[in-house]
Image: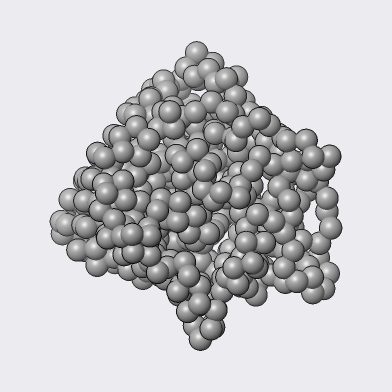
Amino acid sequence: MKKSLKILFILTVMFATVSCDQTFEEINQSKNSPENVSVNVLLPAAMYTQFDNFGGRREGFMGTFTQHFAGFYTSGVNADQYVIDNNSFSFLFTSLYSGPLNSYKDIITRAEKEGSWHYVGVAKILTALALGTLTDVYGEIPWKEALDANNVFPVYDSQEFIYSEIQRLLAEAIVDLGKSSFRPLADGDFIRGGNVNAWITIAHLLGARYENHLSKIDPAGSATRALAHVDAAKAAGISSSTDLKMRYEGTSQISNRWYTLWQDPAIVASKNLLDIQVSQDDPRLESYWSPNDSQTGTYIGFVGKPNGTGAEEPISAVGPEGWYGKPNSDHMVATYFELLFIEAEAAFRLNDLPRAATAHNAAVKEQIELVVNDPADTRIATYLATYANESAVTISIEKIMTEKWKAMFTMEEETWTDMRRHNFQYPNWISIPKKNDGTPVASEYIRRLLYPQDELDKNPKNVPEVAGIFERLWWDQ
């Protein structure tokens, strides 16, 4: 593992380092995939660039929208106060197009020619994930023409079309993974170690996730399709051992991004999450937060910060004592416990209350047992007896979404999507952030990001007009 991660770090620098203001002309003409490099070398470099994008500041800043986190200074406070402009998060847009999406297109072409079908399948799954990442914050995005070297001013496709492409890619990937492969996947897969069946479960997990996102515009249909993916994932043997996650070595070059953020905490614990964990004697408290100040090492206990305020007193942050913040901690991207929460929500929409309750209870238990440092902690049984002991009579959508909000810690874009789908009703203690003087930062919750200024400058005819950060996406109507 150590050798492979060091090699892929070098490859990532060689093949996937891009300027934050690249045009689509530069992206499509980049030489990130030299002809003499094989797909088993290209895949880990693309994976690293895509998955390293999930941790730390990107997820943390979105975590201020979900109120798992609060801004501590400068850019973190700006995100917390909805001071978002066309340069905020622009790295997300550029890095995914110029690095992974371009590389996956090349991998698919090369792997199809040589019959390395498992590489084709994984590249399609990760392409679908990248498209989902982009469309769930921007809505309309370039795709049909985005990677065409002859078209440097790509049109933007509708979010409805992007969602159909996500499901198409995942369906094709499942077929591709079922074929024999010329090149062993283990040679290029540092995420799941070449476990083809694990990738099949991941495809169904993502299929369920993106179907579930359509709960507002197609409640019954999306629930039915999501549960079909849940059933298929379970039949394929999904478990926490098949989770989709970024693996870190823990060196200065390849460290978990929550650990690097601990060293320079632009975001810290939101009072909204931390106080409820303390009041409910949540066994995950120490797994989520450090009781020590990151700058001095002094014990401060568990202290949350009100969202929207700009004070800089010592506040708890994700630290190296817990499950999430060690230098070599994995960063979770899509998980088995997430699938169980999707099952609970979808079953509830279809009025299958016994299934909803059973899935809800299993989801809470699965996540807690995954992340709590001490499995003998007596708080676990007490918490499960209170919050994971539902029946067909007691289960509610509020309980499902509130416990999912607690469990999806650090998976912030997905949590933000959940909250937008449910109009920020859950958890019920969330409120519009307020500045130090008590003034709300806005009259409503943030719903989207703004297109990068570079796109507005260089592709102005095709970038959709956006009224602002409160404009709702297609699935959020």
Where is residue 39 drawn, in percent x and y?
A: 33, 53
Work out whether residue 134 or residue 409 is closer to the camera in this orientation and state it.
409
Looking at the image, the residue that sits furthest to the top is: 461
Which residue corresponds to the image point at 56% horizontal and 45% vertical from the top-left?
17
Total numbered labels: 0
Looking at the image, the residue that sits furthest to the front is: 393
Work out whether residue 419 or residue 73 is closer to the camera in this orientation and state it.
419
Coloration of the structure image: one colour
Vertical arrangement, residue 282 with respect to residue 138, above or below: below
Which residue corresponds to the image point at 68% horizontal and 31% vertical from the top-left?
442
Where is residue 43 drawn, in percent x and y?
A: 38, 54
Does residue 206 appear in this view? no
Residue 309 falls left or right of residue 67: right
Residue 199 falls left or right of residue 335: left
Work out whether residue 227 or residue 83 is closer to the camera in this orientation and state it.
227
Which residue corresponds to the image point at 69% horizontal and 56% vertical from the top-left?
271
Where is residue 311 drawn, in percent x and y?
A: 83, 50
Residue 161 in which image quadrant: top left
Which residue corresponds to the image point at 65% horizontal and 54% vertical from the top-left?
272
Work out whether residue 272 or residue 259 is closer to the camera in this orientation and state it.
272
Vertical arrangement, residue 365 with respect to residue 65, above or below: below
Residue 294 in which image quadrant: bottom right
Where is residue 204 drawn, in percent x and y?
A: 27, 53
In which quadrant is the C terminus drawn? top left
Looking at the image, the residue that sits furthest to the left is: 179
Vertical arrangement, residue 369 with respect to residue 229, above or below: below
Residue 421 falls left or right of residue 312: left
Does residue 180 appear in this view? yes
